[in-house]
Image: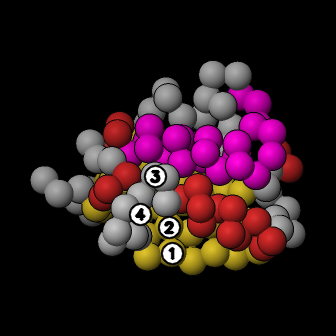
Amino acid sequence: MNKKVIHSNDAPAALGPYSQAIAVGNTVYLSGQLGVDPITGTLANGIDAQTHQAFKNLRAVAKAAGGGLDGFVKLTILLVDLNDFAQVNEIMTGYFKEPYPARATYQVAALPKEAAIEIEAILFLDI
């Protein structure tokens, strides 16, 4: 298997022993992104701001891989409060158009940095 590490300075560095993304062929597996500003390292304030920043971070990693949000085929969204589900859906429509990526959303007990949301993705590169 030929794996390629993907890294973007426009997204936060990994918080542990993992890569921002790994490409295998035309498929890129993006690690979960929090709503952390890549320059300051601080978590955005509130679910709206964190959601926007998480999508921006995913977009930056996708770009480093040679793709964009339109190539995302699967998202996994982790929420500390499932009551934020509708807000996240509304924000997501500003980043994606139909056909939307497949998606799963889970409520979790906690996330790193006390974040409200984490989003991971699978990207397909049409090359």
Residue at image mark 4 = 122
Q: Is residue 89 placed above or below 8 in the rendered structure? A: below
Chief SS of the magenta region: helix
| Magenta stretch contains residue 58 | yes
Residue 103's mark?
1
Disc 1, disc 3: CB below 8 Å?
no
Residue at x 81%, y 65% (from the top left corner): 80
Q: For residue 8, which quarter of the picture?
A: top left
Along the line of sight, the residue nearer the viewer: 18 or 101: 101
Structural distance between the alpha carbons of marks 1 and 4:
10 Å
Q: Magenta region: which residues?
A: 41-62
Q: Is residue 78 placed above or below 52 in the rendered structure? A: below
Looking at the rendered structure, the secondary structure element under dot 1 is strand
Q: Position of residue 83 (x, y in %)?
A: 80, 71
Q: Position of residue 71 (x, y in %)?
A: 30, 58
Answer with left or right where residue 111 lies relative to residue 50: right
